[in-house]
Amino acid sequence: MIDYKFKENQILQDIKEYVDKTYDSHYAKTKNYQATEIIIDQGHGTGFCMGNILKYAQRYGKKEGHNKNDLMKVIHYAIIQLSQDHYKGNQPELRSVMSEKYNNS
């Protein structure tokens, strides 16, 4: 067993729980696609993810103090970007309603 020095095992579990909650949010339940999927599908994913990483990293410690959710958002957007750059072969291609309309016009 690994003796984690920085509570990485607990933090990874917290990250998983945070990400799981985003799939249960009212945004995810009311639409077939989340906004992030449409943004990625339209070719703007990297800028969107990196912009949000910067936004929430710079906000940490300022708005609402040391808000744990700001760091969770940084990590989540980094995971989304990782999925696009390094794990693309392991997921289906996104095909949103928006891209279908755009590609068929």
Image (cartoon, helix red, strand yellow):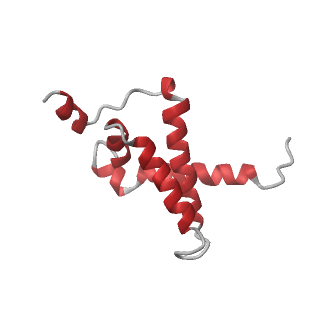
Residue 20: horizontal and vertical position, in percent?
Answer: 50, 49
In the depicted view, which residue is nearer to us: 66 or 59? Answer: 59
Q: Tally the marks.
A: 0
Residue 69: horizontal and vertical position, in percent?
Answer: 55, 63
Residue 84 versus residue 61 in the image, above or below: above
Residue 94 versus residue 16 in the image, above or below: above
In the image, taking residue 103 as reference, residue 7 lies left or right, namely right
The quarter of the picture where the C terminus appears is top left
In the depicted view, which residue is nearer to us: 99 or 43? Answer: 43
The quarter of the picture where the N terminus appears is top right
Residue 55: horizontal and vertical position, in percent?
Answer: 49, 61
In the depicted view, which residue is nearer to us: 13 or 45? Answer: 45
Identify the residue shown where x is 48% and y is 34%.
Answer: 84
Residue projecting furthest to the left: 105
Residue 53: horizontal and vertical position, in percent?
Answer: 52, 54
In the depicted view, which residue is nearer to us: 105 or 70? Answer: 105
Which image quadrant for residue 39?
top left
Identify the residue shown where x is 31% and y is 38%.
Answer: 42
Identify the residue shown where x is 50% and y is 42%.
Answer: 80
Residue projecting furthest to the top: 89
